[in-house]
């Protein structure tokens, strides 16, 4: 998977609130770390990967078979098509037919869609088995594989079925990013930029220095951007695995973002939808009298500079409002949004007035 090795960066997640700690490793040639994470108790290892990573999956299975494991191959559809109950059922069947037990281990290799599905299968099979995430997209490394949110979509909304089930470890091999199509790479930058606005503004400075370079894995700050974003996520989820409070800030831009994804029948990339969602949230913050003009405008400039969208079809607003009602931050009939009180200062905006929402929508309507 990679050509250069060296000591990986190790970022610890959890362990501070009664949850079991685990590590996110960032570096190159990390697959040698897998057997130690799988452990000696396991007899079988199920490797779940998308079609796009057929060769990677095959190589990994061969490695694990050489180590003496009985390997179960489960190829998934690409992207959101894998986050369905039908695909989960296909996986449960494969595990059942191979006598997969509580000491066996699932490895999810792929983007956020793959690790969300693999983690969900791990959470539900036998009420929970060990799993390891090997994210191969920017988005997977900086966000999806870290923190234990797993799940699938339904016709009614994004990630509506799922479980909190942290992995035993996360291996981020930066070399995997070399084969990622640019639009998928850029989609991941939306979550990197989110981490910049909610907690670590240095991320924004690094991207703004050369936005074109930030669009490729060869950029000078790739490793730093990924590590900084993982540290943001690790710090936030470590104190609040089940999203009882502070973890909600990671949902910045997601209330509208998920509504757009559902409206597009999950054919939009997650990061693209979150990008529009963050512009909307920034406008909401500005209209609510919380966010200064410069920081609100900075959303547009940095997201546009890396090639992310800022607008969405204006005629869809009534449907988006309906979709937002099933957001997990909603309480009864009250919509709740994460907005900024300033750079790095996310807060919850409770039940904003519909007129305020409409005014913010006018700023993102195409
Ligand atoms: N659980 C969480 O906390 C969390 C956080 C953020 C996002 N997510 C979820 O993550 C998903 C988006 O993840 P994503 O952006 O990684 O998209 P993705 O998983 O859909 O991957 C994008 C595409 O790239 C392909 N691919 C993956 N790695 C590749 C590689 N190295 N080379 C070539 N092709 C590759 C995939 O097969 C897919 O077609 C969404 O479903 C979102 O809801 C979850
Ligand atoms: O980890 C979290 O918490 C997040 O909100 C991170 C988001 O980037 C991610 O897209 C998450 O899956 C959204 O969670 P949901 O609970 O709104 O489905
Ligand atoms: Zn997200």
Image: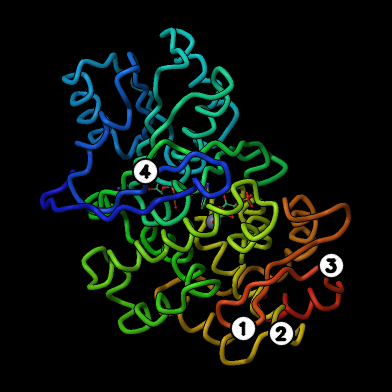
The image quadrant of residue 341 is bottom right
- Using the numbered discs, state the Cα–Cα distance from disc 4 to disc 2 in whole angstroms: 37 Å
Q: For the residues carrying marks 3 and 4, which lies nearer the camera in this image?
A: 4
Residue behind mark 4: 170
Q: Is disc 4's CB within 8 Å of ligand 1?
A: no
Cβ atoms at labels 3 and 1 below 8 Å apart: no
For residue 260, above or below residue 38: below
User: Which residue is at a point 47% across and 66% down the rendered structure image?
Assistant: 190
Cβ atoms at labels 4 and 1 below 8 Å apart: no
Residue behind mark 1: 342
Cβ atoms at labels 1 and 2 below 8 Å apart: yes
Residue 252: x and y, percent? 61, 65
- Using the numbered discs, state the Cα–Cα distance from disc 2 to disc 3 in whole angstroms: 15 Å
Residue 293: x and y, percent? 62, 92
Q: Is residue 282 left or right of residue 144?
A: right
Q: Sequence-wise, which precedes: disc 4 or disc 1?
A: 4
Residue behind mark 2: 290
């Amino acid at each position: 998977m990679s050509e250069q090795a060296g000591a990986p960066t190790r970022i610890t997640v959890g362990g501070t609130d009664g949850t079991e700690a685990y590590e996110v490793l960032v570096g190159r040639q990390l697959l040698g770390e897998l057997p130690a994470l799988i452990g000696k108790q396991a007899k079988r290892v199920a490797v779940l990967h998308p079609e796009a990573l057929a060769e990677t999956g095959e190589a990994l299975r061969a490695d694990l078979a050489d180590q003496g494991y009985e390997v179960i191959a489960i190829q998934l559809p690409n992207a959101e098509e894998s986050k369905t109950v039908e695909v989960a059922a296909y996986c449960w069947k494969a595990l059942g037919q191979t006598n997969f037990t509580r000491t066996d281990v699932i490895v999810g290799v792929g983007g956020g869609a793959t690790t969300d599905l693999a983690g969900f299968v791990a959470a539900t099979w036998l009420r929970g088995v060990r799993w390891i995430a090997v994210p191969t997209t920017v988005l997977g490394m900086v966000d999806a594989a870290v923190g234990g949110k797993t799940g699938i979509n339904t016709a009614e909304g994004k990630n509506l079925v799922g479980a909190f089930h942290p992995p035993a470890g996360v291996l981020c091999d930066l070399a995997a990013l070399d084969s990622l199509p640019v639009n998928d790479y850029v989609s991941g930058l939306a979550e990197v930029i989110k981490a910049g606005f909610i907690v670590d503004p240095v991320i924004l400075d690094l991207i703004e220095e050369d936005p074109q370079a930030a669009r490729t894995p060869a950029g000078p700050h790739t490793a730093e951007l990924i590590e900084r974003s993982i540290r943001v996520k690790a710090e936030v989820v470590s104190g609040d695995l089940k999203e009882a409070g502070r973890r909600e800030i990671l949902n910045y831009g997601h209330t509208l973002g998920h509504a757009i994804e559902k409206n597009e029948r999950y054919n939009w990339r997650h990061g693209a939808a979150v990008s529009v969602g963050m512009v909307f949230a920034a406008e909401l913050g500005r209209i609510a009298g919380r966010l200064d003009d410069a920081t609100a405008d900075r959303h547009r400039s940095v997201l546009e500079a890396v090639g992310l969208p800022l607008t969405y079809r204006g005629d869809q607003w009534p449907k988006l409002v309906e979709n937002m009602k099933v957001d997990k931050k909603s309480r009864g009939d009250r919509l709740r949004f994460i907005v900024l009180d300033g750079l790095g200062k996310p807060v919850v905006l409770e039940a904003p007035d519909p007129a305020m929402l409409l005014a913010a929508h006018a700023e993102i309507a195409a």
